[in-house]
Image (tube, rainbow, N blue to C red):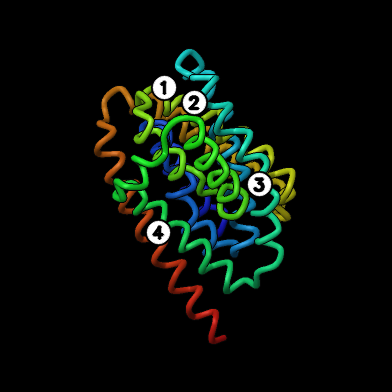
Amino acid sequence: MTVILAAIAAFVAAVIQRITGLGFVLVLVGPIVLLYGPVEGVTIGVLLALVASLVAIPLVWRQIDWARSWWLIWPGIVAAPFGALLVRLLPDAALLLLIAGMAYLALMAGRISALSTSLTGRMGAVVSGSAAGFMHVASGLSGPPLAAYAVGDRWPQRSFAASAQLIFAVFGVVSVALRGLPVTPAEDVGTLVIATVAGIAIGTILSRNVSPRIARAAMLALAWAGATVVLVRGILALFM
């Protein structure tokens, strides 16, 4: 039952990712952490996010802005080990609270206009990339710093969404190297990978008819619910 529920969550997250360009881990992190715990859940989520990005890259290859991507990628690679260190040092209850906190930050970052307006040029890219790399390893939630930079630097949406897949893929490889592979049975992980690939494929078809605004609304609803449940579980874990 656990792998079935996780596969459904991965499929839905992949569909939303393909339509909107963002949101895979934001949608997935709530259910995957509840099903597998804060360490293994994020490890699985990071691996599946890598798969989703690798599958999506060929579909958006021509829209990738390589120069902008590079100035986000290298600071993230430098900051990534610090995220891995934090995960190793914190107990499970603290990790749950950290994941919930990062999820809420991800949901609120776009509403803080001062944040976006301060993230411009190469300095803004370095700050955003560093935060994204750190957050990707710690929780898989690297999208918000990148999105904030895209808004502040007036990065066209199509090019940003395409470039984000490349950035997520690089951060995913680094995160898997630092966190290791899941300890969940290989057949279960394989099922989740298949669900993710299927979600990208179906999302590609649906993207022709489904408005990104509708997909974004679904993403936000699922992400708020997941973050809240993880937060409650983290608070309860403090007293157990």
Q: Which residue is mark 3?
A: 80
Q: Considering the numbered disc 4 on the image, is that residue within a helix, a strand or a loop? A: helix
Q: Is residue 1 visible?
A: no
Q: Secondary structure at mark 2?
A: helix
Earlier-in-chain disc, 3 versus 1: 3
The percent coordinates of residue 73 (x first, y second) are 59, 33
Distance (Cα) linking label 2 and label 4: 24 Å
Judging by the rendered image, the residue that carries numbered circle 1 is: 159
| Disc 4: which residue | 104
Image quarter where the C terminus lies is bottom right
User: Label 3 neighbourhood size at 10 Å, few (<14), some (14-19), many (20+)?
Assistant: many
Mark 4 neighbour class, 10 Å CA radius: few under 14, some 14 to 19, many 20 or more: some
The front one of 238 and 33 is 238
Residues under numbered marks 1 and 2 in contact, where contact means CB atoms less than 8 Å apart: yes
Q: Determine the CA span between mark 3 and mark 1.
A: 24 Å
Q: Is residue 180 above or below residue 235?
A: above
Viewer-nearest residue: 214 or 1: 214
Cα distance between the residues tagged 2 and 3: 19 Å
Callout 1, which amino acid?
A: Ser
| Residue found at the far top of this picture | 62
How much space separates mark 3 and mark 4, taking CA atoms? 20 Å
At a point 70% along the width and 50% down the height, the residue shown is 81
Q: Give the alpha-carbon distance from disc 4 to disc 1, as whole Å.
A: 26 Å
Give how far across and how far down residue 135 sits, in percent: 56, 50
| Residue 83 lies in quadrant | bottom right
Mark 3 or mark 4, which is nearer to you? 3
